[in-house]
Every structure is written in C-alpha cells, then in structure tokens.
C-alpha cells in the first residue's frame, strides 16, 4: 500500500512527461553515441573491404572493441594547446561542433510508441525548422576552430566550410519544401504518420502499413496504394530526395564535399591544431552529424520507423520495439551509403562545389517546389 | 612546341556526373561483396601466418654457428669472418686449448662469439669465408629485441639458432 501513492505521483501527467522524456533522452544518447563509435569502426571496415583489405581485426572479434581502444588512446593523449591560439574559442569550438548534431536527435521520431508513450523526445510542431536551425549551427564549431587556431590551414578550412554550408543549406532547405506541401505539416511525427498511411515518400507504391489492408476497401486504396496522384508526386519526391541527400553530404562534410578538411590540401583542415579529446570531439561530432542527417533523411523520405505490414506500437510493445529497430536499421543503411560513396568518389574542386551548389542544386530545388505546386493544384482541380 | 590536347566531347548525360558515379559505386560494391564473402585474396596475416615454407633454399637469414653430429663446435676461432664482415658485426675472443691436452692440434676455440644483429647486413660473406663451415646463414629473418644488448647474439644464442649440421669437418679430423 505504501507503494501506491508514489506510483500515482509518477503517473501524474506532468511528472510522467518529465521522467519518460529523461529516460528517452538517456537511452537515445547512449544508443547514438554507441552508433557513433561503431560507425568509425564501420568506416574503417567498409573502406578496407572496398580496397580489398581486412581492416581492424586485432582488438576483439573482427576488431569490434577497436572503438574502445581508440577512445582510450585519445583520452590518454596530451591535450596540447599551441601558443598564439585564442584560448576561449579554441576550447569551446569542439563542443560547438558536437552539440548541434546531438540536439537534432531531440525531434526525430525514432519509433511509434511504447506502452502508449510516443517515441520522440520533443514532439515539436516545427520539428523540421528545429533540425535546420540547429544543424546549421554546427558550422560555428568549424569556423571558430579554424579562426581560433591562428594557423593558415585551419583558417582556410574554416572559410571553406562556412561558404560550403551557406551554399548547400539553401538547397537543403528548399528541397524539403515539397514534402511539407504534400503532407501539410512541419511536425516530423505527422510526416512519418502520413508516410505510414500513404506509402513512403520515395516508394509510394509500397504496401501500406498498419491500416494498409483495411484501406484496400476504401475508395482511394488499391492493392499497392498507387494511384495517379501518387505517381505524379513521386517525380518531385525523387528529385527532392536526390537533392536533399547530396546537400546532406555537403552539410556533413563528407566526401565528395569534404573540402573543409581536405587532407591533401589543408593538412587536416580546421582541426589541424587539435589533439587528444578535443580532436576526438570533432571527429565524433562529424559522425554524430552523419547519424543525425541520416535520421532526418529516413524520417522525411524513407518512412521513418514504418515498415510494410508491420503494425505500430499501439498493437503491443513488441511491435513498438520492432519499429524502433526499423528506424535504426534504416539509419545504418543510409550510413553505409555514406561510407560507400566516400570510398568511391574523389573530392570536388572548390569551384566545382560552388558551381554545383549555386547553379544546379539551388535551381533544381526551386523548380521542384513549383513542379510540386503545379501537380498538387492539378490533383485538387 | 605547344601540344594541343583534344578534349573529349561529353554528352549532357556524361556531364551530369551520374553515369560515372553509378559506375564507380558499382565497382566498389563489387569489391566490398567479394571481400565480405572471402572471394578476394587478401594480404597474409603476418604474425599468425608466415611465408617460411615459401622461402628459397638459398635464403640468407640470420648468421648462426653450427655444431657437428657429435655436438662439437666447428669454429676454430680463426677470425676470418670477423675480418671480412663489412659492417664489423662479429666480435670473437679466441681461447687456446691446453697444449698438453688431447686436442692440442686444434689450438683454438672461440671463448666469446658475438654477432651484433643491429649491424649485420645478411650479406653471407662470413659463411663464404669460413674454412670450417662453422657459420651458416639460416632462415630466421625476424630478429627483434627491446634493447641494443638484446640484439647482440652471443655464442649460446648462435648455437641455439644454428643447431647441428652434418658433413665434412676438418677441425676434429685427427688425420688432418
């Protein structure tokens, strides 16, 4: 009996919200940081396999404990601060590079629901705006690192990074506008729910999940859920998807757009002067940004946590867990694609990069908006 | 004289990068899958796998001292190897057999025989010059140590590496 009052306290709406949010935050942080560590391992392993090598295989089975070894090494190294740096900015820059990518995770719906609790840390109605606002802050870390280092190569890296981000942020933002035009919402959870009901943005012909079989009897539902409207909207969605994913490569400084840290030209780019855990923060921040970016791609275009024929969490906790697993599996697949591209393509020249951003992707994204508007207007008439 | 290079005329599709990018992705994923399923021959895992069995008969590894089939040392401490050694890696301290003993005719044996493996260049001149066939280059190529002193092979170590070698021995032949 003495347990009951305290349980009631925990189930009060406000307090319930607080502790479930805290729990979700810790779990997601743990999962994502583990994923960050293991995407470094995956990077090395994938690059090795693509180049007919073996990759890390000494620490643990298939090198699986390698991230721990790397972490310990970086922690034990001397944290060297060169003379002549701006100490304050020099020390906060690594955190500024890491934090935005972690903050993005707050609004991503990583699952449907578990025991009736929605699996998103902050269910913001302006979710996508939050993503863009926060993720573009990541450039501050890089620019400050380049400037505070008081050294020419980091400086060049910082300059390149800021001009690159400004150019690609535009097409990144514009390329998702068609998604909002179709779904009519900025809330990421509702965007995913739209895809559950109407098929994924890039695979609208997919079987519908959950309610899908029931929809077959309604007037708009065919077996494959594919009608004229969806087929027409598929075209701008594919354009959006391609532009968005390419802009995401630029946003996360991945090859072929990794000019801020072009090793062959800039020594190490913006983190040349960094060592030990500060360097590790840049390194991990880059991978965290990659994971957050993949999460956004999955949420906006690949149906988030949904999978055909798999019900959502309202059908039981097992399906809730399956949905969460699906979301992270999709992220892993996108990350593999990032790695695969990195070990295939050479780096663009800086003028090519700018030309692509301003002459091609910006225009394509802009025209795509009008195309979508035209199709929507045609469908409604 | 200026050379004018004719640039290839690329079609619009080729200039969009996409065919080349997809072609590249196809090549890399083929390599990835082949290595993943072990169809690609990859490099040898050195400390676990060695190419010792593939070493040729004439391989020149670490120089060692050998004993004959009766467990007697062949070296007569003539110091020819010490003198011919280009990097001067060999140091010998000869000692004499007692003149009234049964092996007085042999005269000398090496009291100390050191080869500095940091200096050794594996040229094989010591093996060539040895009149008693007492020093041979064996197939040990991985000579490691944590200190300089550890890298100097003394007599005991040299015999341990060398082992026994059968065949003509002049030193212990009473008729010679």
Image: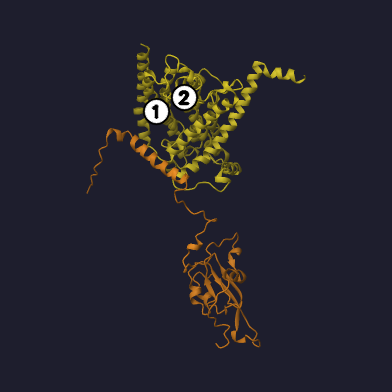
Residue A154 position in % (x across, y down): 47, 38
Residue B139 placement, left or right of A23: left
A254, B45: nearer the viewer: B45
Pointer 1 residue: A243
The picture's colour for chain A is yellow
Which marked residue is nearer to the observer: mark 2 or mark 1? 2
Q: Quadrant of residue A235?
A: top left
Image quarter where the C terminus of chain B lies is bottom right
Q: CA distance from mark 2 to mark 1?
A: 13 Å
Instruction: Kindly give the residue lying farthest to the front in the view shown.
Output: A217
A54, B111: nearer the viewer: A54
Q: Quadrant of residue A225?
A: top left
Residue A245 position in % (x across, y down): 43, 30
Residue drawn at (55%, 80%) of the image: B78
Q: Is residue A12 visible?
A: yes
Residue drawn at (48%, 27%) of the image: A298
Which sits earlier in the primary sequence, circle 2 or circle 1?
Answer: 1
In the displayed structure, would residue B170 be above or below residue A108?
below
Q: Residues within 10 Å of mark 2 (few under 14, many from 20)?
A: many
Residue B121 position in % (x across, y down): 49, 67
Which secondary structure lies at badge 1? helix
Instruction: Kindly give the residue lying farthest to the top in the view shown.
Output: A381
Circles 2 and 1 on the same subunit: yes
Residue A3 placement, left or right of B16: right
Which chain did the image draw in orange? B
A269, A29: nearer the viewer: A29
Pointer 2 residue: A300
Q: Mark 2 falls within which chain? A: A
In the displayed structure, would residue A144 be above or below residue A179?
below
Residue A333 placement, left or right of B160: left
């Amino acid at each position: 009996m003495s347990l009951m009052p305290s349980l009631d306290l925990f189930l009060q709406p406000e307090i319930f919200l607080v502790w479930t949010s805290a729990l979700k935050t810790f779990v997601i942080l743990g999962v994502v940081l583990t994923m960050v560590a293991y995407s470094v391992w995956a990077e090395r392993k994938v690059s090795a396999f693509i180049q007919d090598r073996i990759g890390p295989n000494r620490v643990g089975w298939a090198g699986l404990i390698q991230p721990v070894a790397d972490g310990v090494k970086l922690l034990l190294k001397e944290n060297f601060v060169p003379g002549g740096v701006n100490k304050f900015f020099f020390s906060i820059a690594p955190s500024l590079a890491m934090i935005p990518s972690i903050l993005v995770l707050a609004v991503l719906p990583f699952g449907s629901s578990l025991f009736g609790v929605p699996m998103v840390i902050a269910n913001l109605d302006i979710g996508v705006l939050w993503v863009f606002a926060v993720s573009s802050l990541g450039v501050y870390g890089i620019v400050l690192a380049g400037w505070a280092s008081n050294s020419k190569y980091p400086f060049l890296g910082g300059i390149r990074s800021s001009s690159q981000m400004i150019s690609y942020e535009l097409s990144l933002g514009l390329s998702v506008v068609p998604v909002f035009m179709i779904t009519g919402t900025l809330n990421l959870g509702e965007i995913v729910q739209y895809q559950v009901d109407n098929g994924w943005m890039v695979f609208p012909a997919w079987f519908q999940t959950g309610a899908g079989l029931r929809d077959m009897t309604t007037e708009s539902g065919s077996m494959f859920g594919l009608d004229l409207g969806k087929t027409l909207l598929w075209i701008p969605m594919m354009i959006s998807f391609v532009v968005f994913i390419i802009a995401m490569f630029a946003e996360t400084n991945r090859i072929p757009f990794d000019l801020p840290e072009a090793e062959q030209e800039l020594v190490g780019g913006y983190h040349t002067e960094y060592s030990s855990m500060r360097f590790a923060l840049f390194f991990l921040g880059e991978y965290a940004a990659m994971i957050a970016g993949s999460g956004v791609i999955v949420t906006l275009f690949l149906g988030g946590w949904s999978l055909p024929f798999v019900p959502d969490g309202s059908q039981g906790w097992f399906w809730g867990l399956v949905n969460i697993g699906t979301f992270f599996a999709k992220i892993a697949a996108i990350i593999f694609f990032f790695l695969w591209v990195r070990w295939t393509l050479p780096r663009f020249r800086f003028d090519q990069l700018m030309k692509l951003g301003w002459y091609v992707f910006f225009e394509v994204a802009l025209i795509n908006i009008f195309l979508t508007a035209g199709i929507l207007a045609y469908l409604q008439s | 004289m200026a050379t004018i290079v004719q640039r290839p005329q690329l079609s619009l599709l080729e200039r969009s990068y996409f065919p080349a990018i997809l072609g590249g992705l196809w090549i890399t994923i083929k390599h990835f899958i082949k290595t993943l399923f072990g169809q690609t021959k990859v490099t040898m895992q050195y400390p676990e796998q060695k190419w010792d069995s593939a070493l040729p008969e004439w391989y020149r590894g670490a120089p060692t001292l050998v004993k004959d089939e009766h467990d007697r040392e062949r070296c007569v401490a003539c110091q020819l190897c010490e003198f011919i050694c280009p990097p001067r890696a060999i140091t010998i301290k000869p000692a004499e057999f007692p003149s009234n003993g049964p092996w007085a005719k042999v005269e000398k044996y090496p009291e100390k025989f050191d080869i500095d493996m940091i200096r050794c260049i594996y040229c094989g001149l010591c093996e060539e010059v040895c009149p008693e066939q007492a020093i041979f280059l064996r197939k040990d190529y991985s000579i490691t140590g944590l200190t300089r002193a550890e890298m100097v092979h003394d007599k005991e170590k040299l015999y341990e590496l060398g082992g026994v070698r059968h065949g003509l021995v002049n030193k212990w032949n009473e008729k010679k």
